[in-house]
Amino acid sequence: PANRLQVEGSSSLWRADCRAKGGSPGFKVAILGAAGGIGQPLAMLMKMNPLVSVLHLYDVANTPGVTADISHMDTGAVVRGFLGQNQLEDALTGMDLVIIPAGVPRKPGMTRDDLFNINAGIVRTLCEGIAKCCPKAIVNLISNPVNSTVPIAAEVFKKAGTYDPRRLLGVTMLDVVRANTFVAEVLGLDPREVDVPVVGGHAGVTILPLLSQVKPACSFTQEETEYLTSRIQNGGTEVVEQMFKKEFQQMSQAYAAVKFADACLRGLRGDAGVVECAFVSSQVTELPFFASRVRLGRHGVEEIYPLGPLNEYERVGLEKAKKELAGSIEKGVSFVRK
Ligand code: NAI
């Protein structure tokens, strides 16, 4: 252009365009709920991710400030902000990955299920937008209760005729992140060397760490098993209780969400062997949704791994988890069908 200053954001748009044409990795990512406690640090970390070429930040409040701030970071991704329902479609059009941390969080004394009444409606509206504007996008659902919001999203997509179970993933990564950390503490190892599969769902007893399958191979006493299982299941509550009366950012969740989103983007790029735990449409148990280890690829979930051999403690935990999960899934499904 004759006057480069007159074309708003021209250099950023040029950068995004070049990357798209050059075929180098550069994915378009939207965060819905980007101005919240998880959304803000999540936006910052996604802006630092070299696999992201365009980052759309959508919220019903405060996105202009967050967008202005994040857009000043000198990393590659072009940042655009979107405020309010009228701008939802623009925020979603053309996206490869949509991450949803929109909704209300827990207060002390609340369970994730107490959030259902508000967050179910929010997730439904956002997913209707996805079905219309970017039906092929991978969706990472963070809004709680994940055990119900994922079935809600699936029903919305089914109604719209766009449902592809491979592309809808409930984010349980924080349970794995916590499990790796707490197990590493007990074993006296670096958490980066530890891999704990966490299956089931993302609330209380539905969070089932498989301590018998920890890598590197190790064993735990009954006391350690009970301590670790309880701490992993109640890790979220531990944080919520400490945050009483204060607005906090949710750093560990943002970290976990970015770790998971990055795995999805590496899968989309075609990397081999990208395996993480997620809450997905599944035949691993008799339930229609279940969290377990999945391999991520160009279409989202390419393969779901079986649970592997469980010990007696885990078998009992699994039965408890399934009982609660069945109710949470049914609640989500009937919210949309009713
Ligand atoms: P927050 O209240 O700080 O932020 C939520 C954001 O969502 C706010 O900026 C709000 O304006 C926005 N929002 C509300 N309605 C919206 C709508 N209709 N469209 C777009 N944005 C909307 O809450 P926080 O701490 O960020 O938590 C967000 C959600 O994530 C909660 O449901 C929480 O329970 C869940 N969560 C999930 C975890 C997981 O591991 N899956 C871990 C921690 C929290």
Image (cartoon, rainbow, N blue to C red):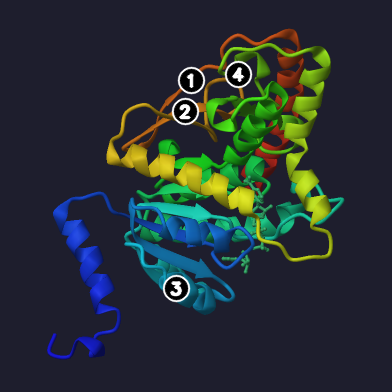
Distance CA(mark 1)–CA(mark 4): 15 Å
Whichever of labels 4 and 2 marks the residue nearer the N terminus, that label is 4
Image height of 68 relative to 275, above or below: below
Picture disc at residue 294: 2
Picture disc at residue 81: 3
| Residue 86 in view here | no
Judged from the image, the secondary structure of the residue bearing numbered disc 4 is loop
**Quarter location, residue 92:** bottom left
Distance CA(mark 4)–CA(mark 2): 16 Å
Give the residue drawn at x 49%, y 31%. Answer: 276
Q: Residues within 10 Å of mark 2 (few under 14, many from 20)?
A: many
Whichever of labels 3 and 4 marks the residue nearer the N terminus, that label is 3
Question: Mark 1 or mark 4, which is nearer to you?
Answer: 4
Whichever of labels 1 and 4 marks the residue nearer the N terminus, that label is 4
Q: Are marks 2 and 1 in contact (CB under 8 Å)?
A: yes
Distance CA(mark 3)–CA(mark 2): 32 Å
Callout 3, which amino acid? Gly
Please provide percent x and percent y for residue 4: 20, 86
The residue that mark 4 highlights is 214
Callout 1, which amino acid? Tyr
**Quarter location, residue 332:** top right
Give the residue drawn at x 48%, y 56%. Answer: 45
Quadrant location, ligand no. 1: bottom right
Question: Mark 4 or mark 2, which is nearer to you?
Answer: 4
Give the residue drawn at x 41%, y 41%. Answer: 264
The residue that mark 1 highlights is 305
Judged from the image, the secondary structure of the residue bearing numbered disc 3 is strand
Judged from the image, the secondary structure of the residue bearing numbered disc 2 is strand
Image height of 173 relative to 247, above or below: above
